[in-house]
Amino acid sequence: MDTSPDDPVTTPRGDFADAVRRSMRAALPTPPASGGRALRPLLLWGAGLLLALLLARPTVAYIEPGHVGIVIHRAGGGVDPTPLGPGFHLRNPLFTAIEAYPTFMQTLVLTRAATEGSPSNDEINVNSVEGQPLSLDVSMSFELDAGKVPQLYSTFRTDITTIAHGFIKQAIRQSLQEVVGQEEIAAILGPKKAEVVTRTQAQLQKRLDPYGIAVKQFTLNEFRAPEAVMTAISLKNVMQQQALTAQNELQKNTFQAQGDSIKAAGRAKAILTEAQAQARANELLSRSITPVLVQYEMAKKWNGQMPQVSGGAMPMLQLPAPLKP
């Protein structure tokens, strides 16, 4: 069967642009014979322009702020080591593809609750130094080094969300096991919680640094241990608190007794000092009282009248003899 060279069914597939042009030309109504020759070139030019616009659009890629573009070479399957920055970029859609990757800060939440993080149970399970099983809810905020994003993509060949819930989650579990596995449960819940978080973040950074993943913050949100262990820890804490209260009360009583003793010693010393002073004064006073002084004082107070008494001898005042010159 003979076919026309303009038939789109028999057009070779390799000449895609020619096929589209012929299809559009075949769909156009046939112009009148008198003006067909003048209108035909104009219609062909318009169809060619439309086809050029359709083919040119995929050659421009736009990278949003906070992202970088990964250039993937379709021919060899390799990845360009230099990422594309934000903005418009030209590309050959037949030989290259561009994958946008976020570099802004992101937060990975790993928890048992389905309302946070992912719908599945993402809690981290580790063991303490006593061998007790622990389940932890954690979160980690991180950023990607733009210069290392192509290497990250070459290593995992997937998006950052899949990497976070796979490789990064496993890195968090390993780091927590190394740190929590050396501590007692009571210490993790109490005085060493901040230390555990700091050491875990340091271990995480060592594991993720080769991939250009910078850990900005690591948080231990919730800690779950067997109920019997938590009850024992609570009882221990209550007993420690009671012992601390008793110790404080004992110290308070001791300080009060010492204060009372010091006050009593001060009062006794004051009384002794006062008694010594009074005795000294009496001694000095007794030494100063002589018979002559007594007679002199009696003479000063005598009014010259003889005492009115009946019977007995008249008391005589013995005046001191005049001093000899």
Image (cartoon, rainbow, N blue to C red):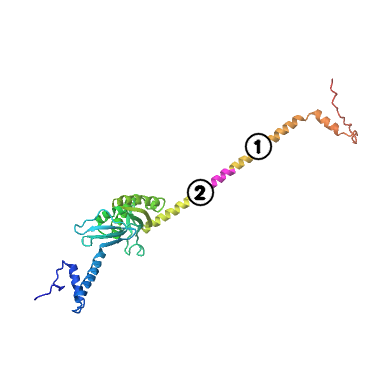
- Principal SS element in the magenta part? helix
Residue pointed to by mark 1? 272
Q: Secondary structure at mark 1?
A: helix
Q: Is residue 117 magenta?
A: no
Q: Secondary structure at mark 2?
A: helix
Quadrant in which the N terminus appears? bottom left
Residue 5 vertical position relative to residue 106 in the rendered view, above or below: below
Q: Is residue 257 magenta?
A: yes
Q: Is residue 12 left or right of residue 147?
A: left
Q: Which residues are magenta?
A: 246-260
Residue pointed to by mark 2? 248
How packed is label 2: few (under 14 Cα within 10 Å), some, or many (20 or more)?
few
How packed is label 1: few (under 14 Cα within 10 Å), some, or many (20 or more)?
few
Residue 181, image x, y percentages:
33, 51
Residue 157, image x, y percentages:
24, 58
Residue 234, image x, y percentages:
42, 56
Residue 99, image x, y percentages:
27, 60
Q: Residue at x 22, y 72 (%)?
A: 42
Mark 2 and mark 1: span between their CA atoms?
36 Å
Q: Amino acid at mark 1?
A: Leu
Q: Earlier in the sequence, mark 2 or mark 1?
A: 2
Q: Is residue 56 left or right of residue 265?
A: left
Residue 140 found in image quarter? bottom left
